[in-house]
Image (spheres, rainbow, N blue to C red):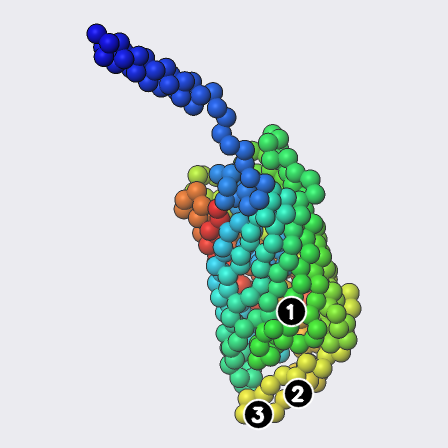
Amino acid sequence: MHGSRSMRSAVAAAGALALFLVAATATAEPPPCSEWFPDFNCERSGRFEGFQKPIVAPYLFEDPFIVTGLYPYYVYHDFPGRSAMQGGDASVAAVQARLAVTDRFSIFANKDGFVWKRPGNPLLDDTQGFLNLAGGIKYAFAQDRDAESPWIVSGILRFEAPTGSTDTYQGYGDGMVLPSIAGAWGHGDLHLVGDFGAQVPFDTNQQSTSLFWHVYADYTVAERFQPFVQFSGLHWVESGDGDIPIQLKGGGELSLDTVQQALGTGAFEGADVMNLGSRNVNGLDLVTAALGAHVPITEHVTFSFAYERPISHHKGIFQQRVTTSVALEF
């Protein structure tokens, strides 16, 4: 009899404990999201819903979103026949990386990669080598991701170090700083992104100083297809000294300024990838237009491609370009 009462008491206690645990589980709130590395801890991406990363001019165009991800690139670039390259092409393979430290602050590496250059000019050798390294920090000054028309504005500061191969016209000067501001706005299936910034070398004699801007728009026409258009511009405000050495096939070298005068190409710069420090480029503008599309494969993986051509009178060494990328974002 005594044992029966003990058994009933134990069962009642266990039942009461189970009911308490069920009630506690039902009413308990989930643990608060960590302030640090939110893309890993908060089950959310810093990129607002529906927005994609612009891929055209990837070394200059840094969008405003605070995200974590890896971004492999492959770029194929044609040189104009009436340039110092006299036709030919170049290819670049690279990987960008970004890390959201908080929901407003991120660090990133946006310029690296390996380039294969194959100029049509018979005096110039085919060469290959690494590009300069560049990266920086980004801070979102203001944002509202939950609004009917979400928006964000961020400030960006980058530094490019002269670490690249001189065979690919990299590695010259003392490096440069690239301050910029970027913003994004969306409404429904329409998404707009833009930026404005500058390339300011520490050695203004050896390298040129320029301003840059980008305007991008995409529209979601299907779950896995977002076509986009982008306009990109470069305006050179100060020239270099034109003394960068140009290696010739079979040995020997000439200064860039001598080559430009001998070939009658006029002044030109290295578009959005190289700073050649050319003389007499101040006041020149290079404007390009691009068409492309994003193809979301999964929630975290998107394939993108674009075709780009110059639309300004001045083309420099820019004939046409194809850019492809895969975004792997958390």
User: Can you say whether 197 is above or below 185 in the image?
Assistant: below
Q: Secondary structure at mark 1?
A: strand
Q: Which dot, 2 or 1, sits closer to the camera?
A: 1
* Residue drawn at 68 percent across, 53 percent down: 156
45 displayed left or right of 22: right
* Residue 318 image offset from top left, x and y in percent: 60, 67
7 displayed left or right of 222: left
Question: Residue 161: which disc?
Answer: 1
Q: Amino acid at mark 3?
A: Gly
User: Can you say whether 268 is above or below 4 in the image?
Assistant: below
Q: Amino acid at mark 2?
A: Leu
Q: Residues within 10 Å of mark 1 (few under 14, many from 20)?
A: some
* Residue 246 image offset from top left, x and y in percent: 63, 83
Structural distance between the alpha carbons of marks 2 and 3: 10 Å
Q: Report the front residue among 162 and 194.
A: 162
* Residue 18 image offset from top left, x and y in percent: 36, 19
Q: Secondary structure at mark 2?
A: strand
Q: Amino acid at mark 1?
A: Ala
User: Can you say whether 95 is above or below 148 in the image?
Assistant: below
* Residue drawn at 60 percent across, 37 percent down: 186
Structural distance between the alpha carbons of marks 2 and 1: 25 Å
Q: Report the front residue among 198 and 269.
A: 198
Q: Which residue is mark 3?
A: 251
- Dot 2 or dot 1, earlier in sequence: 1
Q: Which residue is mark 2?
A: 254
Picture quadrant of residue 198: bottom right
Q: Which dot, 1 or 3, sits closer to the camera?
A: 1
